[in-house]
Image (cartoon, rainbow, N blue to C red):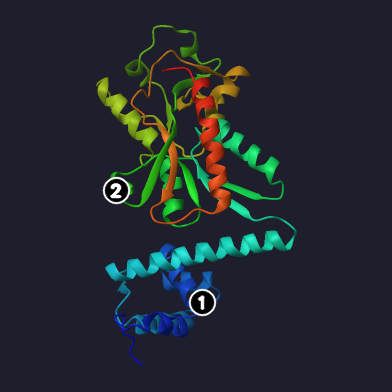
Amino acid sequence: MEYRLDDPNAASRLMNRLRLKHWALLAALSDMPVLAQAASAVSVTQPSATKMLADIELAFNFQLFERHSRGLRPTPLGEEVVAFARQSQAGLARFLEGLETKRRGGHGQLVIGAIMGAAPDLVARAVAEIKRERPLLNVRILGETSDQVGTLLERHEIEFAVGRFSSLMQHNMFAFAPLANETMQVVVRRAHPCARQRALTLAGLTVWPWILQPLTSPARQLMEEEFTAVGQSTPANLVECASVFATLQLLQVSDAVGVLPESVVRDHVRAKLLRVLPVAIGKNLKGFGVLTRIGEPLSETAATFIAYLRRYAPLTSMRRPMA
């Protein structure tokens, strides 16, 4: 039977035709273009997956994937279907997790994304507040950089994010409500040779090893602008690291130079594990805020959490020294 998408009954026919396993296979194909790998991910054989894919394309009445030597590549329309499948699977996973929490006597869950600069102060305060109010609420915090939380938000793996736009086109997908600014600091280990120097410049520091975030992050893009402004190329001796924990550890055991938010390095500086170098940086880094998907209502729990973020934002902004 042929299915026409312009048919007013197309949605109900698709529901009758496609099962959860079909959508799971499409979601798997978004990350694994090789059909055998996607089939294994959803626990079916490759012949079964081949038949399922044929059934899916028959249901939609157009080709979803182009076949290549390296696997399957979504067609333009196929990308739309795959994106919906991925969102559906993420929504189902959140629903099941929340249901299991309630079955155990809990009271729902909240899954958010947060950049590392917002986590130690603002997000931590809001989490503590909502947990005092709702002790059994299951709170999950994902991501560390704006590009990471943006991807999670686009894939519907989180309800909202605390971060900033990481690409020019994200304003078409996400709404942004500012919260606070972020002070970036250049840091090294306490016994670093540069720690004893006062006349330091960014250009002079480029001879040392560096640890920076990936190019997709706004903080890294800012640093590239800073290097350009002083007539320097990106340091040749470079480690790219998206993990704040790994960055902090690497800084403590090497002569590398790093640039991190003040809120992230504060405790390490107080503990005399790291030292802030007198090099101004990040004056043009835009403030972070709440990112939400345009046109999608927030849950009551998420709205409450965002209200706490807004309450504490002025306090955390006052704590940060001006760069």
Residue 213 visible in the picture: no
Residue lying farthest to the right in this orientation: 105
Question: Disc 2 or disc 1, which is closer to the eye?
Answer: 2
* Residue 72 x, y percent position in the rendering: 35, 70
Question: For the N terminus, which image quadrant?
Answer: bottom left
Asked where in the image residue 122 lies, by quadrant, the reply is top right
- Image coordinates of residue 143 in percent, x first then y, are 50, 45
Residue that carries the numbered disc 1 in the rendered image:
21
Left or right: 45 as drawn, with respect to 238 = right
Residue under the image location 38 percent in, 83 percent down = 54
Taking the spot 41% from the left edge, 85% from the top edge, the residue there is 13
Q: Residue at x 43, y 65 (%)?
A: 32
Amino acid of disc 2: Met
Q: Secondary structure at mark 2?
A: helix
Q: Which mark is residue 169?
A: 2
Q: Is residue 304 visible?
A: yes
Please state which of residues 306 and 277 is positioned toward the viewer in this rendering: 306
- Secondary structure under tag 1 reads helix
Image spot of residue 95 (x, y percent): 58, 63
